[in-house]
């Protein structure tokens, strides 16, 4: 069953399209990474999926229903970000108790173990936590809620590297034990590429890529060689990124549609062919210029 279906979805703010004709589907019980630069439309999309915002045009269905102001969608989903609205009159221990009454699948034991693991003070209040500790506490609520649709919008903001690794490990272990649909928005694709199953890449409110994480790792290849030779080899192909090396060499990234015969021929001519990381692919696909920041100095 499809957990989320979008057809030509658009959202306009003050005559600017934050989302532009998005069409995609997300299957149930998968972890999808939502990737994009700042301003790409990630948070707007997630808030529409969660039912916080209504679309300007197009259609969206979550578990077969329109999500905006929908009690069924609200009861079966959770949106975790930096701005979670938690009761200021309750301390952390009381907040977890209150959450247990709100979410039907709440796992109090998991919440308690994570709470103790990250050394929270039960009497402390959420508003007085550091940015990283707030994110960690929000993560506990997101995991323990066990909602059928769990949305994490930049959940690791402020966390140090060790806590981020713990979060990803906890998310994966709990997902394997209790599958549900999870959308994870992050700027750290290199940290989550082994966790997510699919990648949805946005750029300027438009969908640029939607494919499996495994396919993204094979999406592009890098070529290094003499500039004149690479110009000839890439003249009729889509180049994602190019960078000059020294006086007569160049590094080029392009879509990986090469046959094994072409690869062997290129190597015989002295072209070095290397893989391109999934994180770099996303940067190059959404880049405004083929040469990146180097173009500023040319």
Image: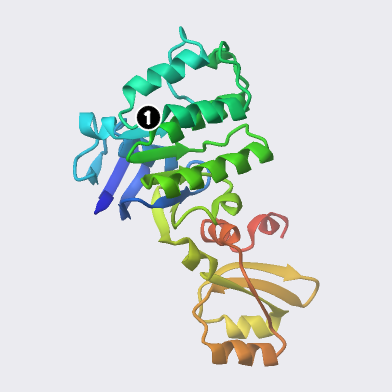
Quadrant housing the N terminus: bottom left
**As displayed, is residue 266 above or below residue 141?**
below
| Residue 293 image point, x, y percent | 67, 54
Name the residue at 56% across, 51% down: 189
Left or right, residue 165 beside residue 184:
right
The residue wearing badge 1 is 106
| Residue 165 image point, x, y percent | 62, 43
Mark 1 residue crowding within 10 angstroms, few (<14) / some (14–19) / many (20+): many
Quadrant housing the C terminus: bottom right
Residue that sits furthest to the right in the current view: 246
* Viewer-closest of 273 and 172: 172
Q: Quadrant of residue 121?
A: top right
What is the total number of numbered labels drawn onto the structure image?
Answer: 1
| Residue 177 image point, x, y percent | 42, 47
Colour setup of the view: rainbow
Q: Quadrant of residue 266?
A: bottom right
| Residue 97 image point, x, y percent | 42, 17
Left or right, residue 263 beside residue 86:
right
Q: Secondary structure at mark 1?
A: loop
Name the residue at 59% across, 63% down: 290
Is there any visible trace of residue 70 in the rendered image? no
Name the residue at 48% across, 53% down: 196
Left or right, residue 70 beside residue 211:
left
* Viewer-closest of 50 and 36: 50
* Viewer-closest of 241 and 73: 73
**As displayed, is residue 266 above or below residue 200?**
below
Residue that sits furthest to the left in the current view: 65
Q: Quadrant of residue 263?
A: bottom right
């Amino acid at each position: 069953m499809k957990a989320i279906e979008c057809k030509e979805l658009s959202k306009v703010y003050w005559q600017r399209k934050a989302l532009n004709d998005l069409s995609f589907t997300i299957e149930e019980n998968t972890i999808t990474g939502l990737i994009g630069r700042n301003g790409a439309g990630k948070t707007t999309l997630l808030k529409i999926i969660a039912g916080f915002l209504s679309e300007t045009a197009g259609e969206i269905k979550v578990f077969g229903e329109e999500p905006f102001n929908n009690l069924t969608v609200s009861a079966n989903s959770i949106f975790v970000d930096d701005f979670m609205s938690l009761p200021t009159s309750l301390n952390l221990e009381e907040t977890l108790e209150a959450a247990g009454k709100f979410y039907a699948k709440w796992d109090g034991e998991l919440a308690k173990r994570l709470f103790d693991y990250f050394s929270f003070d039960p009497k402390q209040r959420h508003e007085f936590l550091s940015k990283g500790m707030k994110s960690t506490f929000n993560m506990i609520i997101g995991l323990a809620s066990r909602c059928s649709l769990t949305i994490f919008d930049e959940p690791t903001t402020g966390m140090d590297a060790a806590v981020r690794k713990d979060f990803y490990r906890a998310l994966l272990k709990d997902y394997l034990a209790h599958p549900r649909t999870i959308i994870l928005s992050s700027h750290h694709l290199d940290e989550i590429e082994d966790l997510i199953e699919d990648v949805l890449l946005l750029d300027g409110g438009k969908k640029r890529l939607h494919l499996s994480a495994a396919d993204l790792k094979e999406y592009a290849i890098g070529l290094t060689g003499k500039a004149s030779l690479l110009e000839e080899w890439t003249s009729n192909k889509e180049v994602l990124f190019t960078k000059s090396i020294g006086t007569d060499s160049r590094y080029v990234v392009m879509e990986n549609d090469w046959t094994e015969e072409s690869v062997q021929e290129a190597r015989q001519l002295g072209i070095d062919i290397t893989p391109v990381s999934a994180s770099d692919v996303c940067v190059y696909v959404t880049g405004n210029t083929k040469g990146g920041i180097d173009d500023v100095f040319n």
